[in-house]
């Protein structure tokens, strides 16, 4: 190395130059850095890179190389310590493919989006989001009838985030589920690149904070607190009471029915004439969180012969329910009603026989 001439001609803020610098440093290759003024190009640059007239230019003894990707591969093949490209040819191809993709598509769109105005800017922003999504791994592990899974699906669709859905059999759990959610062993599980998240409410907040278009939670901290409060209330009080009311008998059933109605009355008050729980204009976090009331709850009522959502008693919730189910995203993302009835009848029978055998 001591007798070698190794020079890098660069410009202080160029990302193309920095990637060469990083490669050399990762390899432990000493080099001389020469700053170039790209707004007033020297003859040196014009002679070293007559084709593109751009930095970086890499000089190794008599050899002159331009184009950062070409330089990096040259460096990797010349100084073989700490290999940068994968050994496997397919992995190498993939690395080259995505490096080019980010360069040609993402960098161009990102730059246009900050250098353009109006429609052109909007188009570039959209392109950027689309490209970001194309390179992301976004998976939802679910179960076809789970209201917890559907709320995540609704959030993703309302945001326009494409994802891969993976069906799990919760009665015969796969190792995938046990590994992804070792704490609860339940669906939904959300996978975003290397990140794995469980618990539907936690997932929805993550989605809202990661893809900021069409915000779901209110902007105001107090309103956010309220949305979280009522989401939990419906989950802990209403869901539990409603399920018990259709799966129990006698006094226990009566008590659970009363609790269900009381919880619904409190939720009815929250609407206060609004179209949606989050306000008048659109579906938000709380609508999604308690969305199961619109579809699952009436089916449970049918299974347990108990009209839970009486429209006279709950005119606000009933109107919201119609509006919510009519929203194109929700309408197209619901489990089939017949199959649900059959499933919950079966679950209901299982609960009854459990109660009978425990002598209650
Ligand atoms: N609190 C969890 C509840 C998830 C849950 O109960 N999922 C059910 C499907 S509906 C499940 O995976 N059950 C499997 C089990 O209980 O072992 C959430 O909000 O994500």
Image (spheres, rainbow, N blue to C red):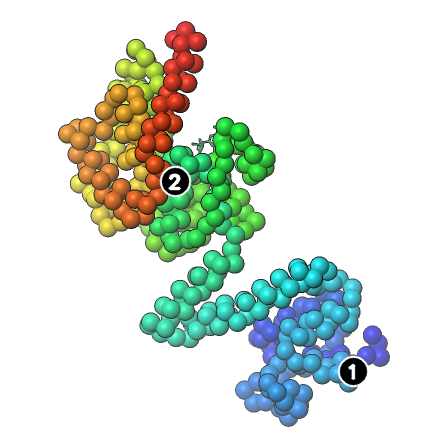
Q: In the rendered view, would you say 177 is above or below 26?
A: above
Question: What mark, if any, has residue 61 been given in the picture?
Answer: 1
Q: 162 and 180: which one is in front?
A: 162
Residue found farthest to the right: 3
Q: Secondary structure at mark 2?
A: helix
In percent of the image, x 30 and y 29: which residue is there?
A: 299
Residue that label 2 marks: 150
Residue 172, given in percent of the width and then of the height, sits at: 53, 29
Report the quarter where the C terminus lies: top left
Q: Position of residue 96 (x, y in %)?
A: 62, 66
Identified at 73% across, 60% down, the residue is 87
Image quadrant assignment for residue 94 = bottom right
Percent of width and height locating residue 51: 61, 87
The image quarter containing residue 231 is: top left
In the depicted view, which residue is nearer to us: 237 or 351? 351
Ligand 1, what quadrant?
A: top left
Which of the two residues, 282 or 248, is positioned nearer the viewer here?
A: 248
Please give the label number shown on residue 137.
Answer: none
- Residue that sits furthest to the left in the current view: 312
Judged left or right of residue 91, residue 139 is left
Which residue is located at x 51 percent, y 55 percent?
A: 136
Comes first in the chain, label 2 or label 1: 1
Instruction: In the rendered view, tell whether residue 240 sits above or below residue 189.
Output: above
Residue 217 in view: no
In this view, the mark in front (2 or 1): 2
């Amino acid at each position: 190395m001591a007798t070698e001439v190794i020079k890098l001609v660069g410009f202080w803020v160029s990302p193309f130059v920095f990637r060469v610098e990083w490669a050399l440093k990762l390899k432990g290759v000493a080099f001389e850095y020469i700053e170039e003024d790209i707004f007033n190009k020297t003859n040196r640059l014009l002679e070293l890179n007559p084709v593109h007239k751009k930095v970086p230019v890499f000089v190794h003894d008599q050899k002159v190389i331009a184009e950062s990707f070409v330089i990096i591969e040259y460096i990797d093949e010349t100084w073989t310590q700490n290999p940068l490209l994968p050994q496997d040819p397919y992995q190498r191809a993939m690395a080259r493919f995505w490096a080019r993709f980010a360069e040609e598509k993402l960098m161009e769109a990102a730059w246009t989006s900050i250098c353009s105005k109006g429609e052109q800017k909007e188009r570039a922003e959209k392109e950027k989001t689309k490209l970001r999504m194309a390179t992301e791994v976004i998976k939802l592990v679910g179960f076809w009838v789970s209201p917890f899974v559907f709320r995540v699906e609704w959030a993703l669709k309302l945001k326009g985030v494409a994802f891969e859905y993976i069906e799990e059999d919760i009665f015969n759990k796969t190792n995938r589920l046990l590994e992804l959610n070792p704490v609860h062993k339940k669906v939904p599980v959300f996978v975003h690149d290397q990140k794995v998240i469980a618990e539907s409410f936690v997932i929805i907040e993550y989605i809202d904070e990661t893809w900021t278009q069409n915000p779901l939670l209110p902007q105001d901290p107090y309103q956010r607190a309220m949305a979280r409060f009522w989401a939990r209330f419906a989950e802990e009080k209403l869901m539990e009471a409603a399920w018990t009311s259709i799966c129990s008998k006698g006094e226990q059933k009566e008590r659970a029915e009363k609790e269900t109605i009381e919880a619904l009355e409190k939720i009815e008050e929250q609407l206060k004439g609004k179209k949606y729980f989050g306000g008048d204009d659109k579906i938000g976090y709380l609508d999604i969180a308690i969305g199961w009331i619109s579809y699952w709850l009436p089916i449970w009522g049918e299974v347990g012969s108990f009209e839970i959502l009486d429209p006279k008693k709950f005119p606000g919730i009933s109107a919201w329910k119609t509006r919510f189910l009519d929203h194109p995203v929700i309408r197209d993302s619901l489990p089939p009603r017949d199959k649900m009835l059959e499933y919950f009848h079966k679950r209901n029978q299982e609960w009854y026989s459990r109660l009978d055998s425990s002598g209650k």
